[in-house]
Image (cartoon, grey):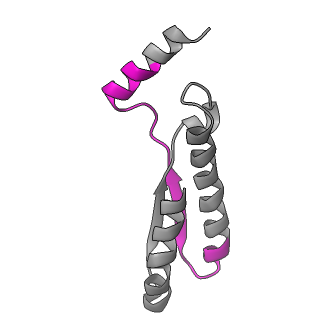
Amino acid sequence: MKSVLLVTQAVLPGMLQRRRGRIVHIFSGAAKSGGILGIKYPAAKAGIKGLTRAYASRLAKEGFTVNAIAPYLIAPDMIQDIEERRKRSP
């Protein structure tokens, strides 16, 4: 989440100066489902969702759009790892 915040803060002054730009954050379905990836990962992804909403609200008056996309499980290795963790869980 920190990296998303820092990058957004870094690009924002230039966008405001040019009076144009769009911000798209990437978070995760884990923000909704939580669970098997532990506590920190889904909490951070939910934080990105909240950060996106806050920036969208703040920058809408300036004519900017701020959105987030949340791809779900897309990496086969990640899916395999989740399945292995699920099998080991009590």
Q: Which residues are magenta?
A: 58-82
**Left or right: 86 as drawn, with respect to 61:** left
Q: Position of residue 70 (x, y in %)?
A: 49, 44
Which residue is rendered at x = 61% and y = 76% of the image? 59
Which residue is rendered at x = 53% and y = 75% of the image? 64
Per the image, is 81 magenta? Answer: yes
Q: Quarter of the image containing the N terminus?
A: bottom right
Nearest to the observer: residue 44 or residue 30 = 44
Extreme left residue here? 76
Number of marks in picture: 0
Which residue is rendered at x = 38% and y = 28% of the image? 78
Nearest to the observer: residue 89 or residue 10 = 89
**Left or right: 57 as drawn, with respect to 79:** right
Which residue is rendered at x = 43% and y = 14% of the image? 84
Q: Position of residue 26 (x, y in %)?
A: 47, 51
Q: Quarter of the image containing the C terminus?
A: top right
Nearest to the observer: residue 66 or residue 51 = 51
Q: Position of residue 39 (x, y in %)?
A: 63, 35
Nearest to the observer: residue 86 or residue 17 = 86
Q: Does residue 81 lie above or below 46 as drawn? A: above
Q: Does residue 56 lie above or below 69 as drawn? A: below
Per the image, is 23 magenta? Answer: no
Q: Position of residue 49 (x, y in %)?
A: 61, 52
In which quarter of the view is residue 32 placed? top right
Q: Does residue 36 lie above or below 5 as drawn? A: above
Extreme bottom residue here? 17
